[in-house]
């Protein structure tokens, strides 16, 4: 059983896969914030672009390969999740949805936070839809997140024209603080009474 003093484990899921994507840049920015604000936490970055995902779901009779079982164990072992998502046509990427759908009980009774980016939408409409998806998976989503509108690589460059770097860093801290509260609370609750 995990004790309350065991460091939290947060899986950071990088959700876009297209060639030339901005996602790794946003993910690297978030990891800089995360390790600064939550140095005790163990972060596991799962980049959907690196995964060879099956077409079918385990509950439909498909047996997981060892690689897929190891991936499921990483989702299971996390106490909380941060989803890094762009907005595609007012929603989130199809590959991200497929990754989410391939796991089920692994997500349950855990908190989820969001870092989003896009054009004018800043990824916020993708996040609203992801909140519905994670409600179905018995997760709680935290209220505050980080959103970058008109996101381009130079927004994240150390000497780039980031319009509000302090604001984004402050938003990341609020997200991590909310995730920390829920992750501890739900880890304790799951240990006391397994979630069904
Ligand atoms: C197919 C497609 C649809 C998009 N739709 C939207 C949209 O509805 N709203 C928005 O704000 N940005 C939209 N964008 C802009 C993306 O959010 C932006 O280019 C982002 O950097 C894409 O993430 P990625 O580079 O990690 O793939 C779209 C981009 C693509 C490729």
Image: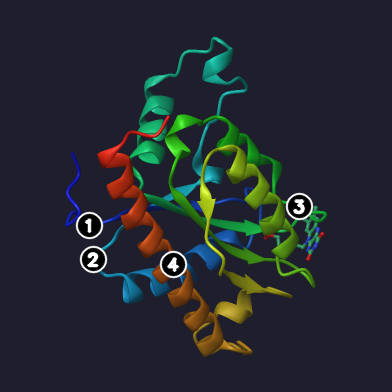
Secondary element at tag 2: loop
Q: Residue at x 51, y 89 (%)?
A: 166
In the rendered image, residue 48, in percent from the top left (x then y), is placed at 54, 44
The response on whether ligand 1 sits within 8 Å of label 2 is no
The answer to whether 114 is drawn above or below residue 68 in the figure is below
Q: Residue at x 59, y 89 (%)?
A: 164
| Sequence-first tag of 1 and 3 | 1
Q: Quadrant of residue 196 in the image?
A: top left
The response on whether ligand 1 sits within 8 Å of label 3 is yes
Q: Is residue 19 visible?
A: yes
| Sequence-first tag of 2 and 3 | 2
In the rendered image, residue 46, in percent from the top left (x then y), is placed at 45, 47
Q: Is residue 191 left or right of residue 125?
A: left
State the separation of the CA atoms marked 1 and 2.
6 Å
In the rendered image, residue 71, in percent from the top left (x then y), is placed at 41, 34
Q: Is residue 43 visible?
A: no
Pointer 1: what residue?
7
Pointer 2: what residue?
40
The quadrant of the picture showing ligand 1 is bottom right
Q: Nearer the viewer, mark 4 or mark 1?
A: 4
| Sequence-first tag of 2 and 4 | 2
State the separation of the CA atoms marked 2 and 3.
33 Å
Pointer 3: what residue?
91
State the separation of the CA atoms marked 4 and 1.
16 Å
Q: Residues within 10 Å of mark 3 (few under 14, many from 20)?
A: some
Pointer 4: what residue?
178
């Amino acid at each position: 059983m995990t004790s309350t003093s065991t460091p939290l484990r947060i899986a950071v899921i990088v959700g876009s896969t297209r060639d030339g994507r901005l996602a790794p840049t946003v993910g690297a920015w978030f990891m800089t914030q995360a390790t600064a604000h939550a140095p005790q936490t163990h972060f596991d970055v799962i980049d959907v672009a690196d995964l060879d995902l099956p077409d079918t779901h385990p509950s439909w009779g498909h047996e997981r390969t060892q690689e897929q079982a190891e991936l499921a164990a990483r989702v299971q072992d996390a106490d909380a999740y941060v989803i890094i998502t762009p907005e595609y046509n007012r929603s989130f990427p199809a590959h991200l949805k497929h990754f989410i759908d391939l796991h089920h009980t692994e997500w349950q009774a855990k908190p989820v936070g969001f870092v989003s980016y896009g054009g004018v939408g800043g990824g916020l409409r993708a996040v609203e839809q992801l909140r519905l998806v994670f409600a179905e998976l018995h997760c709680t989503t935290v209220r505050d997140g980080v959103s970058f509108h008109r996101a381009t690589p130079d927004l994240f460059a150390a000497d780039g024209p980031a319009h509000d770097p302090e604001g984004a860093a402050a938003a990341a801290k609020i997200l991590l603080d909310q995730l920390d509260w829920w992750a501890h609370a739900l880890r304790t609750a799951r240990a006391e009474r397994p979630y069904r």
